[in-house]
Amino acid sequence: MSRPWLLDRVSGSVQAQLAPPDSYQRAVRWLVCPEPAVVLGSTQPETQVDPSRAAAAGLAVVRRRSGG
């Protein structure tokens, strides 16, 4: 028998939400972001974002982990 899905609502900084989870199991996570951010794909080059312009606009630049 397979384990049930974890349903999780996560809030806090974008960086904290995209950090690796404490445990790996099937999960649906609803991420509530309190501030705007530019989220790069897991393999997207950082050169596609100008960090100084993002900072001037008040945007955090973070990378999501793979897995969608």
Image (cartoon, rainbow, N blue to C red):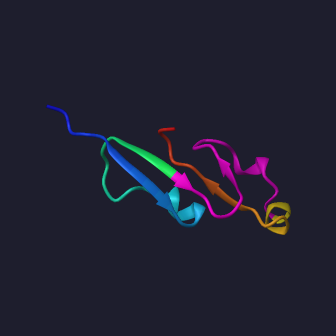
**Image-based side of 52 in relation to 68, left or right:** right
Front in this rendered view, residue 65 or 37:
37
Which residue does the image show at 84% across and 64% down from the upper left?
57
Which residue is at 83% across, 65% downward?
Answer: 52
Is residue 50 found inside the magenta-colored segment of the image? yes
In the image, farthest residue toward the left: 1
Magenta includes 37? yes
Quadrant (top left, top right, bottom left, bottom right) of the N terminus = top left
Q: Position of residue 48 (x, y in %)?
A: 78, 47
Q: Position of residue 27 (x, y in %)?
A: 37, 43
Residue at coordinates 30% horizontally, 54% vertically from top-left?
23
Q: Position of residue 31 (x, y in %)?
A: 53, 53
Examine the image and state in which quarter residue 25 appears: top left
Where residue 7 sits: x, y (%)? 37, 47
The answer to whether residue 68 is above or below residue 8 is above
- The front one of 20 and 58 is 58
Note whether residue 19 is visible: no
**10 displayed left or right of 34:** left
**Span colored in magenta:** 31-51
- At x 80% / y 61%, what residue is drawn? 54
